[in-house]
Amino acid sequence: MAIREILHYPDPLLKKKSVPVTVFDQHLTQLAQDMVETMYDAPGVGLAAPQVGELLRLIVLDCSAADEPADLIIAVNPEIVAAQGESYEEEGCLSVPGFCTLVKRHQEVTLRYRDTDGQRHERHADGLLAIGIQHEIDHLDGILFVDRLSPLKRSIFKKKYLKMLKEQEAEHEA
Ligand code: NI
């Protein structure tokens, strides 16, 4: 197991579309385990393979509350097969550190996926887990949560964020 480096916005890899997994081998299991370790270490509630530089359709999630048992989901080739309702909750992302904003999502989703052995699973989710599933699958399509904002809000975000990055760079150089 190893902790991987998490790519940050505006890394161009985060805009790429990931390809479906076709080989269920040791490499896949290893990558999934590394992603789980990286997510818990961050700490975060979800991570998608492109965030660690692998353009494969693989996500990991654990949206359990601190006082609940762990609820780790490792989903290969995840797909939302049903969705309903609307939610509007604050989201953040390990690839966009220091920024949170309200995002419109479905309230409930049904997720279909394979595990790292290739076995099929289906899971119904609502609340935080439903939001997490939609957020992580977006990563596989090269979409960040800030891409879901209105054009005006997105341009404000971009300006603020790139300014923050520049200031951080300047601090490092000073
Ligand atoms: Ni994210």
Image (tube, grey):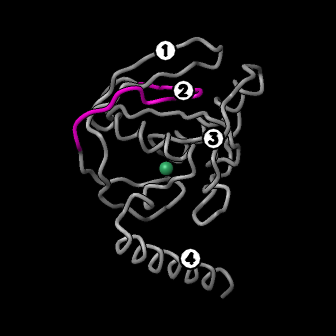
Q: What residue does disc 4 label?
A: 165
Tell me the residue at 44%/79% (across/down). Answer: 160
Tell me the residue at 35%/31% (across/down). Answer: 64
> As drawn, is 104 to the left or to the right of 119?
left
Dot label at residue 121:
1
Mark 2 or 3, nearer chain start: 3
Tell me the residue at 38%/34% (across/down). Answer: 63
> As drawn, is 149 to the left or to the right of 42?
left
Residue 77 in magenta stretch: yes
Which marked residue is nearer to the observer: mark 4 or mark 1?
1
2 and 3 marks in contact (CB < 8 Å): no
Label 4: how many Cα within 10 Å (few below 14, some 14–19, many 20+): few
Q: In the rendered image of this protein, does residue 76 appear above or below residue 35?
A: above
Residue type for callout 3: Ala
Tell me the residue at 70%/43% (across/down). Answer: 54
- How many angstroms separate mark 1 from mark 3 (CA)? 19 Å
- How many angstroms separate mark 4 from mark 1 (CA)? 40 Å
Mark 1 or 3, nearer chain start: 3
Residue 83 in picture, x, y percent from top left: 32, 32
The one nearer the camera, 95 or 152, is: 152
Could you say whether the residue bearing mark 1 is in a helix, strand or loop?
Answer: strand
Label 2: how many Cα within 10 Å (few below 14, some 14–19, many 20+): many
Q: What residue does disc 2 label?
A: 75
Tell me the magenta residue range.
71-86
The quadrant in which the N terminus is found is: top right
Label 1: how many Cα within 10 Å (few below 14, some 14–19, many 20+): few
Q: What residue does disc 3 label?
A: 49
Q: Main secondary structure of the magenta part?
A: strand
Residue 151 in magenta stretch: no
> As drawn, is 56 to the left or to the right of 43?
right
- How many angstroms separate mark 4 from mark 3 (CA)? 23 Å
